[in-house]
Image: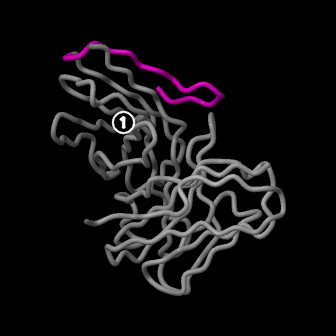
Amino acid sequence: EAQVTQNPRYLITVTGKKLTVTCSQNMNHEYMSWYRQDPGLGLRQIYYSMNVEVTDKGDVPEGYKVSRKEKRNFPLILESPSPNQTSLYFCASSFSGRAINEQFFGPGTRLTVL
Amino acid sequence: GESVGLHLPTLSVQEGDNSIINCAYSNSASDYFIWYKQESGKGPQFIIDIRSNMDKRQGQRVTVLLNKTVKHLSLQIAATQPGDSAVYFCAENIRSGGSNYKLTFGKGTLLTVNP
């Protein structure tokens, strides 16, 4: 089944404790992206990757890192999480960076930073 | 329709009625406009898109209308069903530099279908 998977689905952590949210897609997509979703603010892009070893900042990259060592994986790293990073996070992928209109989204990761 | 603020715009319809969800966009350079559906507890799901050189596109039970003069996009759902209850987002696909594109999402509209 073609899909985007994220782990963990739910995470409660404390300020400053490094964490990684994994994202994997099995559709051989070139383009991958991370979004956060907050009430009243909709979906905002954190980082995106046009292809392996190519990443770039989105609209709200502060406090996050990403890597794209393989085509299928695009982990989101929070080196020192803070409470304002409490949010619902979505990973998404699409066939290419020139056709991102049809993005496939993962199920989401709900992160709470205490 | 979509708007800024903490509260989602809401639309409540009776099962079987037609629904119209509206969206205003800001960037006249957008190549594509897209509608996504997000059910409770799930990620957004692509519904339909429309190129900027079109004014109407139809899918199965859905129609998207694009009015570039007033920068307005709408999603029409025919014979709305309880399974259509969700938050609907419009999004613009904008070239952000070179061959890079990005999606910018609206705030969303909550559609509730009453049986």
Query: What segment carries the magenta color?
Result: B1-16
Q: Is residue B40 above or below residue A93?
A: above
Residue B51 location, x and y as percent? 31, 52
The chosen color scheme is one colour
Residue A51 location, x and y as percent? 47, 81
Question: Which of the 4 image quadrants contains residue A13?
Answer: bottom right
Residue B105 location, x and y as percent? 51, 46
The residue that disc 1 covers is B67
- In this orientation, which residue lies closer to the viewer: B94 or A48? A48
Left or right placement of residue A9 versus residue A64 in this view: left
Q: Is residue B88 magenta?
A: no
- In this orientation, which residue lies closer to the viewer: A112 or A28? A112
Quadrant (top left, top right, bottom left, bottom right) of the N terminus of chain A = bottom left
The residue positioned 35% from the left and 51% from the top of the image is B52
The residue positioned 45% from the left and 47% from the top of the image is B91
- In this orientation, which residue lies closer to the viewer: B15 or B91? B15
Across the whole image, how many numbered discs are drawn on residues? 1
Q: Chain of mark 1?
A: B
Q: Is residue B6 magenta?
A: yes
The residue positioned 60% from the left and 24% from the top of the image is B7
Residue A66 location, x and y as percent? 63, 74
Q: Is residue B50 above or below residue A67?
A: above
The residue positioned 36% from the left and 43% from the top of the image is B35
Residue furthest right in the image: A16
Residue type of the residue flagged with mark 1:
Asn
Neighbor class of circle 1 (other Cα within 10 Å; few <14, some 14-19, many 20+) is: some
Residue furthest left in the image: B60
Magenta portion: prevailing SS class: loop
Question: Which of the 4 image quadrants contains residue A30?
Answer: bottom left
Question: Which of the 4 image quadrants contains residue A67?
Answer: bottom right
